[in-house]
């Protein structure tokens, strides 16, 4: 009996079998590649933390080794925020993980805090900010470096580090990214929320 390939039942069964085969192959490939993907994600996080410590331009193996050298302990606050105790060239530092919202999606970052409550280094990332505008929070190392040396806390312990349109207090303020006011506002809010519970090393020892 000749198989009728124009029959509706044949087409449905053939399509269903094909879908099952493709789904199986995709699931197999995903499972096979997942360990590599997870390793790449973990390495990217380590590199971002190193960037916030002003350690850049390392390949994968170098970054892994440097991370193991400078990051002494990873902690998590009651709110679920990750904080890293580090030591760079004999200097104790805290790196705070930050999360917030930009113009088009989530933004994140890491800020390292020295013993005097000042910014040692900063790195910011984003999910979908506009290239050449909001994306500059990630792409512009020069903008990130503007945070270095800024005072984070006021006399009352509140976060005074700010991203503003016009800098009036160079000790605590960084000018926003040109043409990206809403993204810059998101960075400002992220700093306020993410640094309020992170105390500098000397403050913890006193």
Image: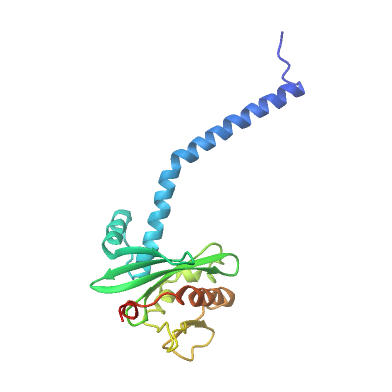
The residue most toward the top is: 1
Total labels: the figure holds 0
Q: Quadrant of residue 43?
A: bottom left
Q: Pick the quarter of the image with the C terminus.
A: bottom left
- 156 and 57: which one is in front? 156
Residue at horizontal 26%, vertical 62%?
A: 69
Please state the horizontal and vertical placement of residue 62, each as a whole percent of the image.
Answer: 28, 57
Q: Pick the quarter of the image with the N terminus.
A: top right
Apparent side of residue 131 relative to residue 153 in the rendered image (left or right): right
Apparent side of residue 138 relative to residue 202 in the rendered image (left or right): right
Apparent side of residue 83 relative to residue 183 in the rendered image (left or right): left
Residue at horizontal 23%, vertical 72%?
A: 89
- 113 and 196: which one is in front? 196
Q: Quadrant of residue 142?
A: bottom left
Please state the horizontal and vertical placement of residue 156, each as a whole percent of the image.
Answer: 45, 88
The residue most toward the bottom is: 168
Please state the horizontal and vertical placement of residue 2, each as a whole percent of the image.
Answer: 71, 10
The residue most toward the left is: 90
Residue at horizontal 45%, vertical 44%?
A: 34
Q: Quadrant of residue 179?
A: bottom right
Apparent side of residue 86 relative to residue 146 in the rendered image (left or right): left
What coloring was used for the rendering?
Answer: rainbow
Please state the horizontal and vertical placement of residue 92, each as a whole percent of the image.
Answer: 28, 73
């Amino acid at each position: 009996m000749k198989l009728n390939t124009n029959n509706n039942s044949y087409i449905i069964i053939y399509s269903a079998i094909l879908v099952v085969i493709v789904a199986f192959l995709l699931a197999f490939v995903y499972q096979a590649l997942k360990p590599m993907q997870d390793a790449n994600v973990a390495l990217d996080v380590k590199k971002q933390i190193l960037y916030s410590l002003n350690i850049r331009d390392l390949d994968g193996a170098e970054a892994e080794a440097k991370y193991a050298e400078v990051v002494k302990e990873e902690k998590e606050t009651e709110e679920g925020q990750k904080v890293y105790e580090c030591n760079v060239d004999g200097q104790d530092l805290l790196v705070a993980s930050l999360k917030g919202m930009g113009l088009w999606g989530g933004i994140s970052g890491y800020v390292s805090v020295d013993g005097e409550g000042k910014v040692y280094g900063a790195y910011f990332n984003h999910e979908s900010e506009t290239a050449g505008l909001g994306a500059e929070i990630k792409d512009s190392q020069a903008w990130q470096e503007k945070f270095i040396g800024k005072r984070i806390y006021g006399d009352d312990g509140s976060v005074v580090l700010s991203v503003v349109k016009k800098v009036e207090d160079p000790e605590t303020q960084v000018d926003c990214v040109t043409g990206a006011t809403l993204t810059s506002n998101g960075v400002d809010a992220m700093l306020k929320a993410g640094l309020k519970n992170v105390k500098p090393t000397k403050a913890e020892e006193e």
